Image (tube, grey):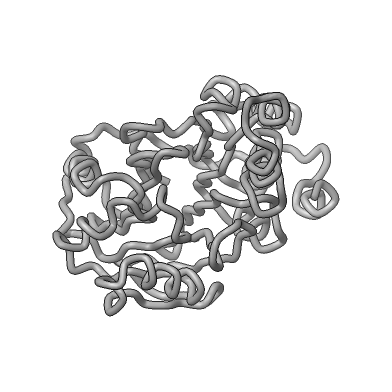
Amino acid sequence: MRRYLEQFCESGREWAARPPAFVIGREGVWKGMVELCTLASGSSGNCLAVGAAGRWVLVDAGISARRICAGLSELGAGPEDLAGILITHEHTDHIAGLAVLCRRTAAPLYASPGAAAALAEKLPQLAGRIVPVAPGAPFEAGGLEVESFPTSHDSAQSVGYALTDGLRRAVIATDLGYITPAVGAAAAGADLLVAECNHEEDWVRTGPYPPFLKSRILGDRGHLSNAAGAELACLAAQRGARAVVLAHLSRENNTPQRAWDTVCAALTAAGAEVGRDVALEVAPADRPGSRWVV
């Protein structure tokens, strides 16, 4: 994996000056920029909102519809304002609130063909609303151009997403066992990257999980460790990303401080100054995170 990443990350590169990412207050709405806010991120549920020009799309709906609507309200929106719901894969922590949410919004659901079939089997009442989109095929939602990319996870054709207004690009890469070329290419084009930092490898190995679960988490179809997430963050930052949000942390095998320290150290070793060259934050597990604009 490291050899592949080095194709993107130039050793000793000077960090070019670039406009910063901003965190804005809940009451602010900035036009003409891509906005992103995680509503929840972790093993117990995942959902985030991406917007441009006052229109919003969701990526996943793994928390209750009530919590999703409350998070949207903090952004000045409601479920009726959603232009689309993008599903990464069919695991419960990514779709738990979807059925109830779909009673409150007419937004179309987008997923890869494999995930769409699995989702229709789990939630047959939504089958007619799911739009299958092949990875790499661009489509429009809420004024944003969306393109998915394949990820390696133990699900039915999981994907990450890149969303752009034509100038700025947000990329979501979580639930993946390792950094594939497709994931690396997507991250290298991000202005804002949401990167998985699920676990500390030694904590998984020495922890109480049964062997089969340890193998699942640490395998090529599992989740990114803090060290692997740090490599992905460095790749994105050295190619121009202005903000990195660390996501999908395990409650049992990680802490927000451990994830942040690991990624900060890697960025520093790569020659970046966190807070000047790139902003870095951990997405909260049970509440909305910062509202980022790039």
Left or right of 244 in this view: 97? left
Q: Is residue 104 left or right of residue 187?
A: left
Write the residue at 48% across / 72% down.
Answer: 112
- The residue that appears at 35% across and 42% down in the rendered structure is 37
Between residues 143 and 19, which one lies in front from this camera angle? 143
As drawn, is 6 to the left or to the right of 231? right
Residue 235's spot in the image, x, y percent? 68, 46
Q: Position of residue 124 (x, y in %)?
A: 30, 72
Residue 219 is situated, as x and y percent measured from the top left of the image, at: 71, 48
256 or 153: nearer the viewer: 153
266 versus 75 height, above or below: above
Count how many numbered circles sit on residues in the image: 0
Residue 33 visible, this orientation: no
**221 w.r.t. 254: above or below:** below
- Which residue is nearer to you in this view: 220 or 270? 220
- Residue drawn 62% across the image and 32% down it: 209
Left or right? Give the position of 121 relative to 69. right
Vertical placement of residue 131 versus 69, above or below: below
> Picture coordinates of residue 76 (x, y %)?
17, 45
Tell me what residue is drawn at x 28 percent, y 75 percent.
129
Look at the image and tell me whether residue 188 can be seen.
yes
